[in-house]
Amino acid sequence: VSRFLLFQLVLNLGFGGVVAGGLSLIGIPYAFVWGAVAALLRYVPFLGGWIAATFPLLASLVMSDWTPFFLTALFFIAIESLQGYLVEPVVFGRSIGVSGPGQFIAALFWTCLWGPVGLILSTPLTACLCVLGRHVPALHFISALLGDEPVLEESTAFYQRLLAEDSVEAGALAEHFLKDHGV
């Protein structure tokens, strides 16, 4: 969890710096303030970056033409997509031990349970539950459902594929094992 929080801090500060720099190049007033707001709002999963975009978009509406508004909108679409679909999955992919679909389902669950506070706390809570599931045998099902580690060992998965008469997948598993371990 501490590694997740450190990575989250670094990514959010980087996001705020990129926002501040991009908005200052576009010519939006108070660009560094909007960058700091974006860095803070980025802690809200899935929605924080888009909420942060509303403030500079409103600030660009008071300018003389529509160009800064459209440039700001395109800028936020680009950086939020890049951050959400490329940077975060690469950085967080193995650092917290929760699969992407598991994190999405957990975010929905915690949001339904506690509202916006649950959305903000969903990733650390789910990571803690996965760690707890790895170390407490009675809770292993949690890490099996939400975690990113394979549930079956390689030999068991190979045997299961053979029993299912899926020779293509069994062959792929055997080739993968041979690459890592040799004959």
Image (cartoon, grey):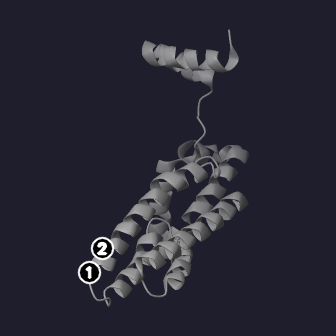
How crowded pointer 2 is (Cα within 10 Å; few <14, some 14-19, many 20+) is rated as some
Q: Quadrant of residue 164?
A: top left
Task: Give the alpha-carbon distance from disc 1 to disc 2, as whole Å.
Answer: 6 Å
Mark 2 sits on what residue? Answer: 70
Residue 181's x, y, as percent? Answer: 69, 17
Please determine whether, in this image, residue 164 is positioned above or below residue 48: above
Identify the image quadrant of the C terminus.
Answer: top right
- Given residues 26 and 139, the one toward you in this image is 26
Q: Position of residue 109 (x, y in %)?
A: 47, 62
Residue 120 in percent (x, y) is at: 54, 70
The residue at the point 60 percent across, 64 percent down is: 11
Q: Is residue 73 left or right of residue 7?
A: left
Which residue reaches farthest left?
66
Q: What's the residue at 55%, 64% (across, down)? A: 122
Secondary structure under the numbered disc 2 in the rendered image: helix
Tell me the crowding category of disc 1: few under 14, some 14 to 19, or many 20 or more residues within 10 angstroms, Cα based. Answer: few
In which quadrant of the rendered image does the N terminus lie?
Answer: bottom right
Looking at the rendered structure, the kind of residue marked 2 is Phe
Disc assigned to residue 135: none
Which residue shows up at 59% across the image and 34% down it?
151
Q: Residue at x 26, y 80 (%)?
A: 66
Q: Does residue 137 appear in the picture of this structure?
A: yes
Return the residue at label 1.
66
Tally of numbered tags: 2
Between 22 and 175, the residue placed more toward the observer is 22
Secondary structure under tag 1 reads: loop
- The amino acid at mark 1 is Trp
Please say if the residues under marks 1 and 2 sit with CB atoms less than 8 Å apart. Answer: yes
Residue 73 at x, y percent in the picture = 34, 72
